[in-house]
Image: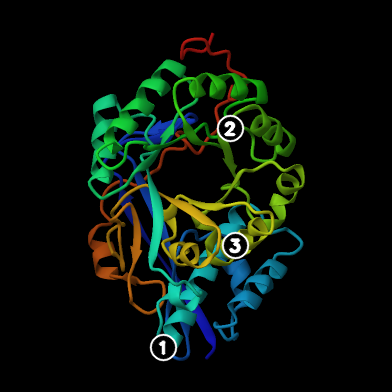
Amino acid sequence: MKITGYRTLSTRHAWNRSIGDVNGHIRHAVTEIPIVIVETDAGIEGVGIGSHADLDRLFPALLGEDPRAVTALFDRMTAQVFKSGHAGATYGGLATLDAALWDIKAKAAGEPLWRLLGARDRFVPGYASGLDIALDDDELAAFYATFAERGYVAGKLKGGLDFEADLRRLGILADAFRGNTSTPGLMIDANESWQVKQAVRYVAALEEHVDLLWVEEPLRRWDAAGHARLSNAVRSAIATGENLTGVDQFRGLFDAGAPDIVQAGAIWGVSHFVRLSFAAAARDLPVSVVGYNANPAVAAAAAAVPNHLTTEVQDVRFAPGLIVDQEFIDGGIVLGDEPGAGIAVDEAAIVAASAGEGWESTAGPHMRPDRAGLRLLLDGIER
């Protein structure tokens, strides 16, 4: 079997709510969902979801190769961009091609990807995440109630600006899950908005009232020493790593003993997650997938590694034209039996849903505010 080409598609996911974090938010949010389909001379096609970045630069490493050599082809793609490097957006394109190759490999074997990767159980534990900083209290309660109805027992709040609001809103999350458990799992995500001492004061104050499972991305992603200092100063686990593009970028964090929970962005794909998981396992650290809906193939890898903790679930729907053989029930993700990653593409449905405006704004959570990390906040207002 040989790789002969690829084609790209895009669909749009309407969140039907505002989404965002401490860095900004988008009302009536619509996200572009890039799809890559890798073609072979055997007629088997692989589907990857995630990014279209630098595909033309990466694909020569795959053309004419046997797609089942996924691990070697992952390294071949990183070598293809050796001089400019694989970091940042390029890693997204690489990971999407990688996910498509894993899909082909499992389809060729006639097995679901989770089984091919060695998983024993099709269930992947998960937690709810509303990207919820712009939701009012009633909207917040309604969102987490829908996940509680599906058996979820934990949720993550976007916060970090207003202590009193965060404390109140964490209480709303806890109330939503109390029908399923007497001790709901609560996390808070500050999206790299604090300095070390800001984080210590804020988290320590929260811990007087709330038993947090973890604090996510409290500091800049590269601040290994700062994360280690913070972890030693608070009870909560410190979770970080979702924005690091390559296992090599975790070296400083690991050397400093910085992360308590090692996070992998789902958009960085299957091979990244598997390799990172084993690097973390060698240090007795758990791993967690962030932004799961961006790449549903990664759930198969989460089921297969020995140290997966829980996966962030941001929605229970996929974009038009994407049919995914998974269910969001029983407090997690239940993987199906379709060969491959379980992703089917209905191109007609994508075309039919393509009318309207996409997410064109350059503001919102993907642009860091000028004063991030420099704010003097006393009551939720910059002073």
Given contact means CB atoms under 8 Å apart, are the residues at marks 3 and 1 in contact?
no
Query: 230 above or below 101?
Result: above
- Residue, disc 3: 272
CA separation, marks 2 and 1? 47 Å
Query: Is residue 246 something one can see in this rendering?
Result: no
Place of residue 92 in the rendered image (x, y in percent of width and height, measured from the top left): 55, 58
User: How packed is label 2: few (under 14 Cα within 10 Å), some, or many (20 or more)?
Assistant: many
Q: Locate the C terminus by quadrant.
A: top right
Q: Which residue is mark 1?
A: 43
Helix or strand or loop: what does disc 3 sit on?
Answer: helix
Quarter of image, res 238: top right
Q: Which mark is residue 218?
A: 2
Mark 3 or 1, nearer chain start: 1
Q: Position of residue 196 (x, y in %)?
A: 66, 25
Q: Secondary structure at mark 1?
A: loop
Q: Residue at x 61, y 43 (%)?
A: 260
Q: Identify the element where label 2 is drawn.
A: loop
Estimate the x, y position of residue 140 in percent, counting from the top left. Answer: 29, 32
Tell me whether circle 2 and circle 3 mark residues in contact (CB < 8 Å).
no
Is residue 36 at all visible to an observer of this figure? yes
Q: CA distance from mark 3 to mark 1?
A: 27 Å
Residue at mark 2 to residue at mark 3: CA–CA distance: 23 Å
The residue furthest front is 182
- Disc nearer the start of the sequence (2/3): 2
Q: Quadrant of residue 209?
A: top left
Residue 146, x across and y down, in percent: 24, 43
Between 57 and 247, the one lying in front of the other is 247
Which residue is rendered at x = 52% and y = 10% of the image? 378
Q: Amino acid at mark 2?
A: Pro
The colour scheme used here is: rainbow
Name the residue type under label 1: Gly
